[in-house]
Every structure is written in structure tokens, then in C-alpha cells.
Amino acid sequence: MKTPLVWKIVIVINLLLLSELPGASVRAQGEAAVHISAPEVDAFPEITVYIDPTARDGSPQQGLSAEQIALTEDGIPRELLDFQELQPGIQLVVAFNISNPFAIQDINGRSRFEFIVESLLNWAAQPLDTSPDDLSIVTNTGLEAVHLTSREEWRKVLEDFTPDPREVESNFNVLARAIEIASDPVVQPGMKRVVLLFSAQAVSDSFSAIDSLISQAQDNQVLVYSVLVSSPAFFETEGALKLQSLSQETGGVFLPFSGDEPLADLGQLFQPLRSTYLLRYQSSIVTGGTHTLEVTIRSAPADTTGLREFYLDVQPPNPILISPPRSITRTAQAASPEETENLTFLPTSITLPLLVEFPDSHPRGLEELIFRVDGEIVEVKTDPPYDQVVWDLDGYQTSGIHYLTLEAVDIMGLSRMSVPTSIEIVVDQPPQKISGIIKRNAPSFAGLGLILLLGMTLFILIARGSIQPGRVDSTSWIITQGRRTAGHIRRILTNDSSSVQGMTISGANRYRLTAINDVSQQLFTEPITVNEREIILGNRPGDGVIQIQHPSIIAEHTRITAREDDRYQIFDLGGVGGTWVNYQQLTSSQVHFLKDGDIIHIGEAAFRFQTFPKIQGPLQNEENHL
């Protein structure tokens, strides 16, 4: 079978272009280029890339030094942590999609398939001056030999492969399997992934599958070298052009083979793939999205630059308390059964296990881990392991609910605070003995006895007529003091500690708003105490309005109402920044009740809602009800 002159010229041109290295930064023929691999981000924030610079004649540039390399990330120069010139092998998968055209013979009775096998065996017998290759063979007849490191073993598999092409139908599933094998992790840094496909022209039914495989090969940086096995009359069919597109779009080379000309020298074909440069640098990316990487090689007569875009997902670390208890009971401990003063409560602390996860799948070091209780910093850890925090409970002598948060700050400066976790502390107070009550309140009892004695004396004096009934100043004073002292004693016996402390909180439903983030703390350095039944939180001054001057807050943003049943309602009034309670956004039609410790976000300002205990004045009510 004679090959037309035009196709002999085409084949010669293809052979001359074999040394052109394909890649993501391909330039026009005759220009120097820098191909940049997709960045390896497994060790983020350290990023590794491989570059393959070529000279004007398409040959690889060798002998470069780190001083000749300039790397920028998103336009910002980055210093190289590592620079190496490597000569790895290749991860090669030879894929046979055999069909009837492979059986066509020349005048000597040798088939195209025999020429192909001979060429592959000759290449495998050549000595290597680089690291060993990773070799595989897959066929549409079912033969598969995967990841062989011995060339002799690979040659043996090929020698034993003797199919009859006339009895085999074309099936591009073999290409899918070849790309899958080539996409496996490489055993040497910088290895190129290559599929060498021998196939007849594709039929239209396989076009959509090939388009999908092109995307798969691109995603895994697999170069597909296609050898079209057919007669020259079929070199310009749609099926032939589809194979050519497969190679061009994956960065490989397309070669037609009719059997009247020798196959390309595979050693020369793959030589440009056997050298590469490793570059490692510290990334400064702190936001997810598409980023740019630019590598410039300074050399005469002009610098050569390659550009690569890549996508990187970057998110703050997420600290999580692992199975925290709902409540902790502190039990009083005394030196003896009679001892009721200077009690200690156990436990004195609790260890809380935690986990810091990275939603972007890029684990990295932490600068610090901050543990807060009710908005106050309890512990700051700056050294690993970050797997637990210790909560000191010594200061909690009364029962109550407390809110715990964790904040993790990574080495990139990214931080995130956990959702508050509520834990109730239950303090088990021992019953007070009457002797202890008398001992602690001896002065009050002495005063009561004195008043009673004075009252009896006054009664006797009145009975004897020594004091006239119209003069009651002394009597009134004694009665008043008696009432006050009696009320004081009653509160002692009922363990009303607030009266002893002299607190004078009056008015129902008092509460306060404590600033807990940067925006609110800059505006309010002290907690805001609220006595009104209803207030508006907004960005305007006026009566009944707590003015929060921030662009995220409208004139009337949020309303809080104290109800007669001692409950608190919060309403969103339609601000763009929204109203949030415990990180859940309220709707304008939603009715929500607040509870002590809730976190409220008004726009970008955050407050903790805290109620006051309802304690009556120490003397007033006793006088009114005695």
C-alpha cells in the first residue's frame, strides 16, 4: 500500500515536532515557554509546583539555578523554600484499542500490529539515564498489567500478547481505564502521567465519551499521545480529528501510522518528559477561590514567563467540643459533719475534650486556641496538643447556666469561634444547722433580745402609769426596730443571702446587654443596663432607643419587650443586617423569647443578654408585710 506524497510530508513534520514539550503554558512554535503543573496543596500553606521550561527550539532547559527563578502568587513575590532539578521516570500506560485496521499487512506479510509491538520492544530495550519508569499495559481484549517497574517484565507481557485484530472490536473503554491507571499517585516526585493510545479512527458513537475522557485527563494532568492506526485515506475523517483533538487538549502528541513508515522513536518522543524542576514556597492565600501563579526564568536573551490559574478552598479552622456534659454537679465537702463553714466543692475542675477540624481539608498549625466562659477568657493555649481544655470550677459557688466557646486561630491568621455550648453547674448546698445559723448571726439575735427586753420594760412602765399613753415616740421607735429586726431574722432563717448583702435591685424584668465582639465593644465599654419595659436598638438617638452607631444597623433595627409574665421578647424590625439570636436569624414575623445568656447579633454588633435576679430590698418589704 503506497502512501501519498502529501501524507509522507505530514508524517515527517510530526516527527520533527516530537521534541516540543506540551503543557499548560504552550506557546507558538519557536518561542521559549514555561509549563507550570497544577499546584500540589496537600501540605498547604506550603505549595509545590513543577515547571518544565523549554528553549526556542523546544528542547528542555537544563542547569537552571534558584537565583534565575522568580515566583509570584496573585501578583505578590514569594520566596522559594526549595528548588530542585529532577530527572524522574514517566508513569506510562500503553493502551491498545485493537480492531481490524491493525491486521493490515505490508508486501512482506507483516501486520501493522507487529510493527507496533516491535517498536515498543526496541524502546524498552534501550538503556535509561534517568530514574526507572512505571509501566502498564491495558487492551480491549482484557489483558491488563499494571504498574510494573521492571522493563523486562513489561517486555515479556508484550511479547506474549498475540491477539487476532480481525476478531476484536474497537472499544474506547480501554482509554478510560488507561487514564484511570495513569492518574494513580506517582512513585517519584515530578513524574509525568502519560497514556500512549494505539487506535483506529473513532466512530461517532464514541465522540461524547472521548470528550468526557478529555476532561478527566486534564483534571489529572494525564498527557494522551494518540497513534492513529489506519490508511492515509482515513487520516482526515471526523474520527481521526477527534483523536487529534484528544491529544492536543490534553497536552500530548498526535501521530498517524499507516504501516508504510516507521513509528516515531519513543525514546525521543518521551525524552522531554524526563526532566523537571521542583519549586516549593509558603503561600499567603487566606481566601478561597481562583488564584494565579507566575514563574519567570531570567535568562538571555530574554526572560521567559509561565502563568497558571488554580482553584484553592481556604476556610478558617472549626473548633468543636466533643460530647460536653449537659450539667456538672458540685458537691460540698467538709472536714467534719459539724463543719458548715469554709466548705470546698468537688470537682474543682473538668477536662473538656475537643477537636479542631479544617473544612477546607488543609490541616495546618494553630497559633492559639482561646477558651471562653460567658464571654470571659479562661484559657489560651499556644502550644499543641490542641485536644482538650481545662475548666477551673473553683469560682462557681452557686447554681447557674454558663456558655462555653472555643476560638481557633491558625498560622495563616484565620480564626473562627464555635457555637456557644450551654452547661449547667449545679451546686449541691448542704442543709444549714440551727447552731450554725445562731453562731453566724449572734449579733442580730443579741439585738433582738435587747429590743424584746426594752419592749417588756416599756410595757411594765405603761402598766404602772410611769409613761403616759399619749407619748408614743419611744414605743414607735421600739416597734419599728422590732419589725426590722424580725424581718432580718426571718430572711436569715430562710437563707435569703441577698438581704444580707444589702442589695436594692427593684423593678421587674431588669436586664443588661454586654458587648462581646469588636464592633459592640468599641461602642460600649460597659454593659448596658435596661430598666424599661420596651426598648428599641437602632442607629438613631431618642428616648427609649439604645443608639448603636454602625452602618450595618438601621434607625430602628430591633425591639426587646419585657412582659408581665417575666419573659422577654425580641423582634426584628426589618434591618438589612438582620437580627440573630444564638447565630439563628429572626424573621420579621417571628416571635422569639430570650433567655439568660443568649447571644444577640444586631447587624454586625453582638451582645450577651443577661437577666438580674429578682431580689427585694432588704428592709422595705419586711416593713410593709410584717
Image (cartoon, rainbow, N blue to C red):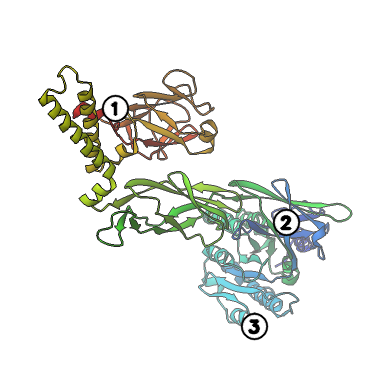
* In the foreground, 533 or 57: 533
| Residue with the mark numbered 1 | 563
Mark in front: 2 vs 1 = 1
Q: Quadrant of residue 21?
A: bottom right
Q: Amino acid at mark 1?
A: Arg
| Residue with the mark numbered 3 | 152
Residue 262 in view of the camera: no
Q: Give the number of callouts.
A: 3
Question: Height in image: 277 above or below 477?
Answer: below
Dot 3 or dot 1, earlier in sequence:
3
Give me the residue at 88% from left, 55% from top. 300
Q: CA separation, marks 3 and 1?
A: 88 Å
| Residue with the mark numbered 2 | 35
Q: Is residue 608 left or right of residue 186?
A: left
Q: Secondary structure at mark 2?
A: strand
Q: Is residue 178 left or right of residue 498?
A: right
Residue 483 in view of the camera: yes
Q: Secondary structure at mark 3?
A: helix
